[in-house]
Image (tube, rainbow, N blue to C red):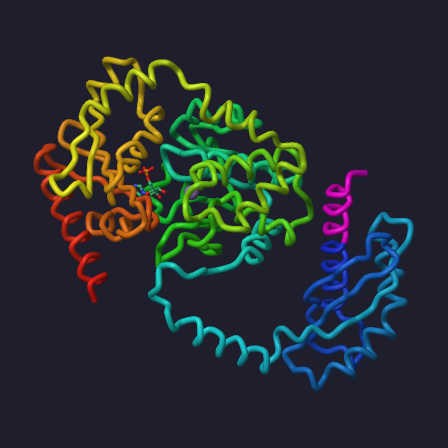
Amino acid sequence: MPAEMAGIRLRRLAEQIQMEISDLLLRGLKDPRIGFVTITDVELSPDLSRAWVYFSTPEGPEKQEQLLEGLRSASGFIRKVLGKRLHIKQIPEFEFKYDHSLDRGDRIERILADVREKEGWDDPGRTRGSAEEVARALREGKRFLVTSHRNPDGDAVAAVLGLGNILRRMDREVVLYNPDPVPHNFRFLPRSDEILTEYGTGPFDTIVVMDCSELDRAGPLPELAGSRLVGIDHHLTTSPLGDVYYLDPRASSIGEMLHRMLPHLPLEMDIELATCIYTSILSDTGSFRYSNTTPEALHVAAEAVGLGVSPWDVSLQVYESQPVERVRLLARVLDTLEIDASGRYGSILVTQEMFEQTGTSLELIDGFINVPRGIRGIEVAIQFRQDGAERYKVSFRSRGIVNVAEIAEQFGGGGHANASGCSLDGSLEEVQERIYGAVEKALRACDSSQER
Ligand code: 5GP
Ligand code: MN
């Protein structure tokens, strides 16, 4: 049996044992020493010979010795009942352990940690939630809807497929969803055709939204009441999405964050998941070039390559297979290049007419904005993409000095320090005037802070 299958079975059996013992205790073991006991967790040795049964009580740790005695003397009876109810050959030997995590002392520790955490609470760069919490939520769910932001990029697509792989291997029901198409250069990812443009019929007990810090950047979602919303994100924000979330703005990509969740999940990377994780990191680090190319990003990518992912094959798909229409569109777009008199910011424009004339659509423009950013002297590159007669989607890229997330936020958008976006209503001239004003102000602020 593959290791991950064995892992899932083990976890399930442990959960079953936890339920059965809880049930027995609830209905009373007629032992006065066993008062209000809660079984908080069960862990099994892989050969099923031993089970660690964690318990707790609201009466506090003073009661633990007494409870321990009671549980130990009841364990023969518990094993007999389990033997009848669970269809396993051998019932494990129990080892009862008192679970301190719910104790008052610990609670005070946690309150103190919370207070410490709240200092700097308004820092959008801090980590919130954890890989472990989200992994637990994944283990607890049964029927999942998995999605990301609209107009998904490589990170968003690979994250959805990667999590799909994880949940499928955990035997969960999963619907992968994005109302917008998978960009042509990420369709090579395993099972990319399984991302549906409609979520179909629920109900979903868990809805996972990735690479997205605001619900309105995700597509239409089913009624959230009755579902648990889980967020996995790496944008700069003080208000992470979800009832349960893992937000780390220092993570290179969602792929890297999924990798961090693996120690808390009953499986390991397989080649399919490795392909998704590698592509996610590749895509969001701009092929291991941006400042988010951390040692961890490279380590995880190396692990994926070690499992058999071929960097050249992925590059061929992602960067070296463009439709000729994309290049023709790029030619038109680059013809609109404008550089400010100071030479410190520049912009390109993509209109609806250009899409019509070249027979293309917006999924092909990813990466265009890197051309103006690559010009010597440019600190901020801007892309205006017409999104309606009088509406523009504006993208920003920074060379590193200007925090463009702060600029986008002024217009109701957001993103990362070096890549952000927002949408504005108005004519092109009006929109440009407002955006250029904000960029110039940001550049001046950087100048004066450097002088200081
Ligand atoms: P892009 O320019 O590729 O559309 O977006 C660059 C980054 O900015 C993305 O990672 C995305 O998170 C962020 N971003 C783009 N548009 C918006 C927006 O309208 N709102 C927010 N909050 N973030 C955006
Ligand atoms: Mn991302």
Question: x, y percentage for residue 335?
Answer: 20, 22
Q: Is residue 380 left or right of residue 262?
A: left
**Left or right of 8 in this view: 358:** left
In this rendering, is residue 21 above or below 436? Answer: below
Residue 231 drawn at (x, y percent): 46, 50
In the image shown, does 393 or 201 lie closer to the viewer? 393
Characterize the magenta stretch by its predominant secondary structure. Answer: helix
Q: Quadrant of ligand 1?
A: top left
Residue 84 lies, with reference to residue 186, above or below; the image says below
Left or right of 274 in this view: 380: left
Residue at horizontal 17 percent and vertical 33 percent from the top: 391
Residue 52 counted in the magenta span: no
Q: Which of 37 and 185 is in front in this view?
A: 185
- Residue drawn at x 59%, y 55% as measured from the top left: 136
Q: Where is residue 333 in the image (x, y as percent from the top left)?
A: 23, 24
Residue interval drawn in magenta: 1-13
Q: Nearer the viewer, residue 309 or 289?
A: 289
